[in-house]
Image: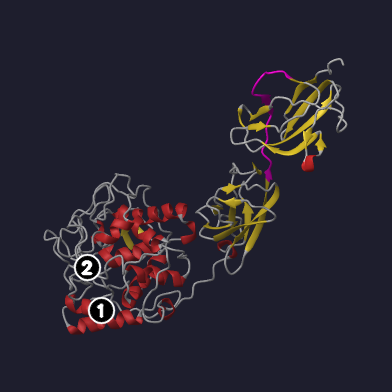
Amino acid sequence: MAAQFGRRLRRGATSTAVAAAVVAALSASQAPGAPLAQATPPGGTDMPTAAEPEQGAATGNDGYHTDLPPLTTPNAPTVSVGLPVGSAESGIPASVLGAYKQAQSTIAGTDPACRLPWQLLAAIGKVESGQARGGKVDASGTTLTPILGPALDGNGFALIQDTDDGAYDSDAVHDRAVGPMQFIPSTWATWGQDANGDGRKDPNNVYDAALAAGRYLCAGSRDLSTGSDIDRAVLSYNHSSAYLSTVRSWFEYYNDGAHPVPDGTGVLPTTPGPATTPATRPVSASPSPSTPPSHPSSPSPTPSTDGKPGSASPSPSPTTPPSGNPAGTLPAKPPTTTTPPPPSQALKLSGIKDAGTGTLTAVTGQEFAGSVTVRAVDGQGNGFAKAPVTFTISGDTDAHFAGGATTAEAVTAADGTAGAPALVAGETTGDFRIHAVAGTTTRFSLDVTATVTARRADTVTRTTSTELTAAPDGDFAGVQVRATLDGAVASGVAATATILTSGGEAVQDGQGPHFTGEGDSVVSTLTGLTTDTDGLLSLPQIHAGGTAGTYKLRITTEGGAVLDIELTVEAAPAA
């Protein structure tokens, strides 16, 4: 869906010679980090990951400013904060700079693995809107007049029919890029943010737009401390090699230094860019010349915490780039190619730890109260985000995760933690393991032990109070008991029934009350009994036998509950 860069320039440049000079300058300006050839896959398409944006570009690949930074690297001012000193181009309006830094801080807390630098937002903001047209924003960070890109009608740009009924771009026929970061409405509908806490997601607000752009650039598993992922992120924003070169040049420039200037006093771009509303006159492509101020070399001051100075000063006339620029619009900057250092060990996945899983115990058929939680860490023990983790149940068990699977996958959160799904015990008692593995190329693992115990009961009672008496060689009335645990029905509890003498001794088979065992055998003990879903257990028929006397029927359950019931075998009548 990318538009042809040359066509965009011809639409706004004053002459063919100017357009040619722009293209030549951009082609010569090689960005730091991974070469562009490595950033663009075969076929010329920046392929997104499954979690990355699927639309062609955040901006719809519309027009943008093509100014390149000055040849001289910027230095921060040494005089009072708020004055536009140092290199004019290195001064960023305070509210706009504050929005970039706030977005970096917010994303560092929610997605630290992305490692978003505010300088990348500043580079894109410079190219897309000239730092919101020199910082012409109100106290809340909203542009004083809307900044709109050209209609995406397929005439030199992508063709995107209206998706917002003109709500954002006042165009009910075609979409237009909107606001400081030039989002097309359909993309804003997905990525819009409320960063200034006013309850609205406003693409015309520099705080909302900067945070949305940051989250868009961080999509998927991108790590913006690496050159290749920066290239992928920028190309997803506007898929053009010239656009990437321009953004990369400003990114390098702002990395060398930047400082805040009062809102409304930022340097306006001199090349054609996003269209403005009729109330705002586009900047001329040939501004009146002026001399940029000198560059002091003290450290850059930090803007106010809210990034919103009180009053805005009138915007000065645009400055002409330094000499040595025959076209009068773009400075000639020698190509620079810098390979970023490899990430330190602190930024690499270095291990996996238990994150407070605790003791995992459940009775058969029940869900475990806790779940397995692990934490991926880097070389300094800090949480490592976006690491894939696989959990696998192993051992002699029929336990499973909720849903029935024995394997589950997760991705670590911003603090490096990841949790397995709820764990459900099967009918097999005993210990088993949950094996957690983090990483892809290099893998780190740990095992967590879980235990399944049998269902228990702490109380057993008869359901009736009828005395159990039988004549010799007769049968006793049926016996039914109920098992409970903490007052609740205890279903599926294993139980044993044993007939004893009144003194608690074992009854010799055939010499007192008894059950019928396999093959009509006489037994005094039955095992393998289980309470039903209502916690009830109905015993098999008890035969009295021929020996008169008093006996005990003892019922015991898993969990230690015991119930003794008296059995009386009457004496035989006299002959």
Q: Which residue appears at 68% of the width and 48% of the height?
A: 428
Question: 156 or 326, which is in the foreground?
Answer: 156
Residue extending farthest left = 278
Reading the image, the residue beneath label 1 is 4
Q: Amino acid at mark 1?
A: Gln
Relative height, residue 42 to residue 217 (above, below): below
Residue extending farthest top = 574
Relative height, residue 45 to residue 92 (above, below): below
Q: Which residue appears at 45% of the width and 52% of the height?
A: 110
Dot 2, how many residues are within 10 Å of its Cα: few (below 14), some (14-19), or many (20+)? some
Q: Is residue 409 magenta?
A: no
Question: 319 or 35, which is in the foreground?
Answer: 35
Disc 1 to disc 2, how far (Cα)? Answer: 15 Å
What residue span does the magenta drawing correspond to?
Answer: 452-468
Specify the quadrant of the image occupied by residue 563.
top right
* Model colouring: secondary structure
Q: Is residue 235 left or right of residue 175?
A: right
Reading the image, the residue beneath label 2 is 160
Quadrant (top left, top right, bottom left, bottom right) of the C terminus: top right
In the image, residue 516 lies at what x, y percent?
77, 36
Q: Amino acid at mark 2?
A: Ile
Q: Which residue appears at 27% of the width and 51% of the height?
A: 141
Mark 1 element type: loop
